[in-house]
Image: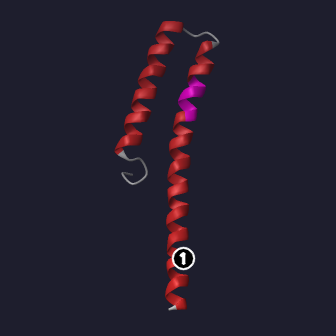
Amino acid sequence: MKEIIKSGNTIVIVITFILFTIALFTTGLTKDILLEAGVFLVSVKIILMSRANKKSINELKNKLNEIIDKLN
């Protein structure tokens, strides 16, 4: 699980969730809660997309290294 969510990503998720909780108590259950939930979900989605991009980049690097090895 540690390789899925790094410490920096964990900090971003925790801070966003804390701000989301504070906004929940200050605004109550109004239409603003949808905005706050959206911000939280966007933050999580960006973190998950960065992980997927990193995985794709590593796969491309491995394939390029295989091509280079075959050419040598």
User: Between residues 15 and 30, which one lies in front from this camera angle?
Assistant: 15
Vertical position of residue 48 compared to residue 40: above or below: below
The answer to whether residue 24 is magenta is no
Looking at the rendered structure, the secondary structure element under dot 1 is: helix
Q: From what the image shows, is residue 67 above or below residue 33?
A: below
Which range is magenta? 37-42
- Residue type marked 1: Leu
- Count every numbered label the image shows and give the total: 1
- Indicate the position of residue 43 as horizontal and vertical percent values: 53, 34
Residue at the spot 39% in from the left edge and 54% down from the top edge = 3
Q: Residue at x 36, y 51 (%)?
A: 2
Percent from the top left, x then y, of residue 25? Answer: 47, 10
**As drawn, 13 above or below 47:** above
Please give the residue where the numbered disc 1 appears in the rendered image. Answer: 64
With 60 as the anchor, is 4 left or right in this view?
left
- Between 29 and 23, the one lying in front of the other is 23
Magenta portion: prevailing SS class: helix
Across and down, in percent, residue 16 comes to: 45, 27
- Does 37 sit left or right of 1 as displayed? right
- Callout 1: 10 Å neighbours few (<14), some, many (20+)? few
